[in-house]
Image (tube, rainbow, N blue to C red):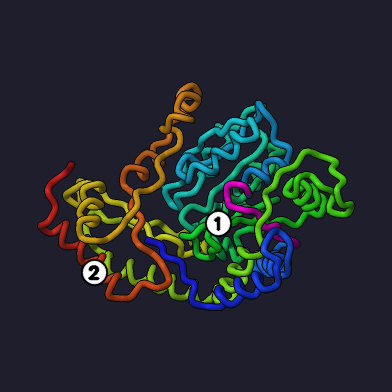
């Protein structure tokens, strides 16, 4: 589905880290990764953490989000976005997505803001950046902070600016299926020196970075290892090459699937340069002739792994009760959650793989489908 590409210096750098004995949360690869990733994103600094969920949690801690606060998030996202809000005792308030980007819809934000709202977490869903100028404007009017969830949007661009540099803080994931990966890992990018100090302090058990074993606050062990950063440094050396091949895969999918009735693609805004993370389609059952789930089952039987879109969070048990109490109505989210499919997308795919996948989708519609189910 999304196999990592580890064909560069990953093994060499990991062995080097092992031989140096720096295998924990201190070492040259950590310093190199944080320096180079900040440069890639165009921010003052990057702070490595142990995964993307922790990055979100730590950002909220650094921003002093507290029990009783509300944070606006899209419902169409991986559950970590909302879980992190709950970790600090706050409540995620769900907002519908824009049908033209699949990201949180700025036009829906005003109605969701209450006196308890503290901030907004726009998610660059499936690599497409959210409309950050509109979101930042609304946040500024209401005195709210903004944190980008850029877990899926490595090197995406919004109006020429790189994801990770578009708000007060941004969070990233380097899980095994991401464009850049180290298996498990994450990062926060930011440019405010005071916020950086607070974030680094909280990440390292609350210890003052300038005074060893002095702990001015209660902190957490959210650090990233030198071994993981060794892999990331090798990944970043080939970042442009990896991106180029993934863009080719996206272009091929669009060409091969274009014109199949009922098959839709993620829209691309004129101001966006999405990160080619997972290639996504929607299946309109009436036009295609069979349901999304039936197509996915057929592809699985044909040896092709797929994924449904993230299940809308406002319908899941941890959040459903509060969402219904607020009367949330998210029609675009509900439609995409029912129709969306992520197709295999990774650097090592061959053109013949793409052609076979497209052929399965086309032929199933032409005669292999068993009707709506």
Work out how far the residue at label 1 is from the one at label 2, CA to CA, in angstroms. 31 Å
Q: Quadrant of the N terminus?
A: bottom left
Rendered residue at 50%/25% (across/down):
322
The numbered disc on residue 184 is: 1
Q: Residue furthest right?
A: 211
Q: Is residue 91 above or below residue 97?
A: above
Q: Residue furthest top?
A: 325
Magenta residue check for 52: yes
Asked if residue 156 can be seen in this view, the reply is no
Q: Which residues are magenta?
A: 44-54
Find residue 342 and report its image quarter: bottom left
Please state if 367 lies on the left or on the right of 144 as rendered. left
Question: 79 or 97: which is nearer to us?
Answer: 79
* Tag of residue 127: none
Label 1 or label 2, whichever lies nearer to me, is: 1
Q: Provide the secondary structure element on which disc 1 rests.
A: loop
Residue at 81%, 47% in the rendered image: 207
Residue 356 is marked as 2
Would you place residue 262 above or below residue 157 in this image? Answer: above
The picture places residue 321, in percent across and down from the top left corner, at 46, 24
Q: Going 36% across and 45% down the picture, which residue do you hit?
A: 336
């Amino acid at each position: 589905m999304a196999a990592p590409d580890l064909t560069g210096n990953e093994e060499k750098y990991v062995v080097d880290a092992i031989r140096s004995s720096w295998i924990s949360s201190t070492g040259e690869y950590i310093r190199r990764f944080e320096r180079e990733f900040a440069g890639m994103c165009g921010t003052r600094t990057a702070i490595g953490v142990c995964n993307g969920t922790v990055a979100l949690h730590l950002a909220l801690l650094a921003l002093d989000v507290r029990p009783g606060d509300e944070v606006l998030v899209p419902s169409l996202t991986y559950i970590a976005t909302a879980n992190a809000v709950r970790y600090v005792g706050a409540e995620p308030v769900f907002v519908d997505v824009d049908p033209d980007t699949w990201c949180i819809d700025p036009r829906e934000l005003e109605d969701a803001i209450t006196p308890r709202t503290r901030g907004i977490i726009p998610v660059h869903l499936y690599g497409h950046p959210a409309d950050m100028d509109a979101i930042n404007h609304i946040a500024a009017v209401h005195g709210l902070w903004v944190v980008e969830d850029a877990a899926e949007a490595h090197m995406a661009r919004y109006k020429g600016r790189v994801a990770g540099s578009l708000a007060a803080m941004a969070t990233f994931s380097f899980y095994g299926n991401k464009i850049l990966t180290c298996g498990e890992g994450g990062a926060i990018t930011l440019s405010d020196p005071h916020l950086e100090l607070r974030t680094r302090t909280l990440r390292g058990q609350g210890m003052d970075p300038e005074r060893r074993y002095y702990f001015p606050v209660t902190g957490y062990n959210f650090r990233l290892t030198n071994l993981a950063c060794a892999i990331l440094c090798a990944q970043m050396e080939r970042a442009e090459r990896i991106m180029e091949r993934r863009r080719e895969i996206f272009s091929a999918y669009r060409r091969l699937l274009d014109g199949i009735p009922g098959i839709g693609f993620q829209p691309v805004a004129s101001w966006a340069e999405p990160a080619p993370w997972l290639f996504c389609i929607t299946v309109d059952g009436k036009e295609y002739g069979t349901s999304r789930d039936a197509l996915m089952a057929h592809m699985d039987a044909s040896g092709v792994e797929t994924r449904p879109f993230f299940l809308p969070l406002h319908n899941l048990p941890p959040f459903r009760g509060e969402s219904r109490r607020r009367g949330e109505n998210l029609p675009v989210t509900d439609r995409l959650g029912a129709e969306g499919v992520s197709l295999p997308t990774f650097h090592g795919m061959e053109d013949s793989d793409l052609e076979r996948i497209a052929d399965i989708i086309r032929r199933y519609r032409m005669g292999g489908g068993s009707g709506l189910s």
